[in-house]
Image (tube, rainbow, N blue to C red):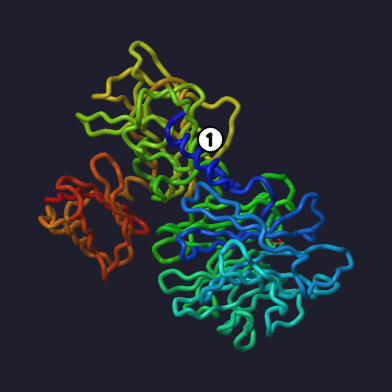
């Protein structure tokens, strides 16, 4: 057992906290749904979900909200129960004794945390929803339900409260259900609407599950639709927190649950999509919360979220682009059993990603990191974004260190199992001249995919390159005049003629990405002044074309 694992279990023992290795679903000991994610001033990301109780009875037995938090998206702390139906002073017995503690949200204002939850206060439950509020001075404990419900709302069928706080500190309240979505400002006291509810216009096929967030000055409203094959998550954008909204599309396909409900939050520079599935129970009424990376296009629209289930997410959350090259050592993050399986047969500490199990060594003469010491039963996952529908050829730079032997690997895409997958032969080569194994005819559609690499024996694996049959050649242009000055003595490069937004990715000679930046006409500089002198590689991605060039940092 490696040292970090011992420390992990020691920490678990000493802190007495329940930690979950990240694996979608992220909570596995109770059923949870409707996750609302928030980052508070203590630097933790908190999630406030609802709680499905087993055995399910419609959605009516939901009760006993728990709170979860993380600092690394990998280990989750269950802070325990914060509020239950029997704490609600204005609740009345309902005809069918349901608990009906549905999708909640939480807000912070002036030193206090406000937990909002929908609950019907009389029968029939489906037309008498109120929004209850519990208040605490801590984010995950000490909540007390106040005597009044949110002031200014009618008795109605509207559920799923959402509170968005703008940069100026003004809080907004949203809720909705059954085709209607409303919003209004909240007063300073956070328990009263400041003005009449306004209908949120411009949404398409709104059902429930409102969530509002802001990015680069633009407001986003996300929600679940009525899609018959399982609800999807859709979104709209606006320059105003109360709309009118401009509908943009679907960002999460149906999950294994027939309902859908999500939230979107930025944490440590990466955006995340929370949602729920029924993967744990197999029944849509006993749900489980999940999280995956969320990415934006250069125009601010949202890319479809890949539901990774147990496959992990891109290393350092930098999504590799295909056509292109992925270094073997930049396999997914997420740990053993999720992003990879390693039989821990290495001969010493890794030279890169030191705390992880996958064996990585460095071949110094070529300044090359490579994955090594592989054995039967292992796998490594790579998630990437394919820019064009195409039939791809993948060239693996790889060799087995066992003289006179041939080893094999096979591949799996997007968890699709086949009973007799094609195996590819890997011959003996030294590290100085690793061989190339070509895998043709891989049909991939535009979007995010995960490839699982499965060795059948020991190999040294450096990298792999996807080349498209039709699109790659005209889509990648090598341009030596793209940047000036080049060489740059002060490490500051300007990218010429940027007409529209473009995404710049700079890697060092080992293939490690050191900088990722969106460039536009106002800001077209790349600052490498704090990096060592030498050669770097720039990939500039516009909507249609990828430009590549060398950068010389003098
Ligand atoms: O969880 C109960 C209800 O189902 C929520 O309030 C809706 O958003 C849907 O997820």
Left or right side of 517 for 209? right
Residue 111 visible here: yes
Q: Nearer the viewer, residue 16 or 167?
A: 16
Residue at image point 54% right, 55% down: 69
Q: Residue drawn 26% across and 39% down?
A: 510
Beta carbon of the mark 1 residue lies under 8 A of ligand 1: no
Q: Residue furthest front?
A: 14
Q: Nearer the viewer, residue 296 or 379?
A: 379
Which image quadrant for residue 465?
top left
Residue drawn at 60 percent across, 27 percent down: 419
Instruction: Residue 297: name its quadrant.
Output: bottom left
As helix, strand or loop, the secondary structure at mark 1 comes to loop
Residue 418, percent from left and from top: 59, 30
Relative placement, left or right, of 184 versus 294 is: right
Q: Quadrant of ligand 1?
A: bottom right
| Crowd band around label 1 with a 10 angstrom C-alpha radius: few (<14), some (14–19), many (20+) | some
Residue 292 position (above or below residue 88): above
* Residue found at the very far right of the displayed protein: 95
Q: Is residue 442 visible?
A: no
Q: Position of residue 290 (x, y in %)?
A: 59, 51
Residue 351 lies left or right of residue 551; in this view the side is right
17, 403: nearer the viewer: 17
Residue farthest bottom in this picture: 195
Count how many numbered circles sit on residues in the image. Answer: 1
In the rendered image, residue 68, in percent from the top left (x then y), is placed at: 58, 55
Please name the residue shown 46% across and 62% down the image: 42
Q: Which residue is mark 1?
A: 337
Please tell me whether residue 455 is drawn above or below residue 310 in the rendered image.
above
Question: Residue 433 at x, y = what percent?
Answer: 25, 24
37, 372: nearer the viewer: 37
């Amino acid at each position: 057992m490696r040292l970090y694992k011992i420390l992990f279990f020691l920490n678990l023992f000493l802190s007495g906290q329940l930690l979950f290795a990240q694996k979608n679903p992220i909570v596995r000991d109770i059923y949870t749904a409707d996750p609302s994610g928030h980052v508070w001033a203590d630097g933790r990301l908190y999630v406030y979900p609802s709680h499905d109780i087993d055995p399910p009875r419609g959605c009516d037995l939901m009760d006993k909200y728990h709170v979860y938090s993380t600092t690394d998206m990998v280990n989750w702390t269950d802070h325990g129960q914060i509020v239950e139906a029997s704490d609600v002073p204005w609740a009345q017995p309902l005809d069918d004794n349901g608990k009906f503690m549905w999708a909640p949200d939480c807000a912070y204002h002036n030193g206090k945390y406000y937990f909002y939850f929908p609950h019907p206060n009389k029968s029939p439950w489906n037309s008498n929803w109120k929004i209850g509020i519990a208040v605490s001075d801590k984010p995950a404990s000490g909540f007390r339900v106040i005597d009044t419900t949110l002031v200014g709302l009618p008795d109605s069928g509207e559920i799923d409260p959402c509170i968005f706080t703008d940069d100026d500190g003004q809080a907004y309240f949203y809720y909705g259900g059954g085709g209607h979505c409303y919003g209004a400002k909240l007063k300073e006291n956070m328990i009263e609407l400041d003005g009449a509810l306004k209908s949120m216009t411009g949404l398409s096929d709104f059902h429930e599950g409102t969530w509002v967030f802001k990015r680069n000055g633009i407001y986003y409203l996300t929600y679940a639709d009525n899609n018959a094959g399982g609800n999807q998550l859709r979104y709209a954008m606006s320059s105003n927190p109360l709309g009118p909204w401009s509908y943009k599309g679907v960002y999460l396909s149906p999950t294994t649950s027939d309902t859908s409900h999500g939230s979107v939050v930025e944490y440590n520079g990466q955006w995340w999509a929370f949602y729920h599935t029924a993967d744990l129970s197999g029944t849509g009424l006993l749900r489980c919360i999940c999280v995956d990376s969320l990415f934006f296009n250069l125009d601010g629209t949202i890319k479809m979220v890949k539901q990774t289930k147990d496959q992990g997410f891109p290393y350092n959350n930098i999504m590799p682009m295909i056509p292109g090259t992925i270094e073997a050592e930049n396999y997914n993050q997420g740990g053993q059993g999720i992003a990879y399986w390693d039989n821990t047969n290495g001969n010493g500490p890794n030279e890169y990603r030191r705390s992880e199990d996958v064996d990585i060594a460095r071949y110094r003469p070529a300044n090359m990191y490579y994955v090594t010491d592989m054995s039967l039963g292992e796998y490594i996952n790579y998630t990437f974004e394919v820019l064009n529908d195409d039939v791809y050829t993948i060239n693996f730079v790889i060799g087995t260190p066992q003289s006179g032997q041939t080893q094999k690997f096979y591949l799996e895409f997007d968890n699709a199992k086949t009973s007799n997958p094609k195996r590819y032969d890997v011959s003996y080569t030294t590290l100085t001249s690793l061989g190339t194994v070509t895998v043709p005819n891989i049909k991939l559609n535009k979007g995010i995919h995960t490839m699982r690499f499965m060795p059948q024996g020991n190999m040294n694996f450096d990298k792999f390159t996807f080349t498209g049959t039709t699109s790659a050649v005209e889509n990648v242009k090598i341009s030596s005049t793209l940047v000036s000055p080049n060489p740059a003595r002060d490490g500051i490069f300007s990218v010429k003629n940027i007409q529209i937004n473009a995404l710049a990715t700079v890697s060092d000679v080992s293939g490690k990405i050191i900088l990722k930046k969106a460039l536009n006409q106002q800001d077209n500089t790349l600052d490498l002044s704090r990096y060592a002198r030498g050669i770097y590689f720039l990939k500039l991605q516009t909507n249609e074309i990828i430009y590549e060039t060398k950068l010389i940092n003098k």
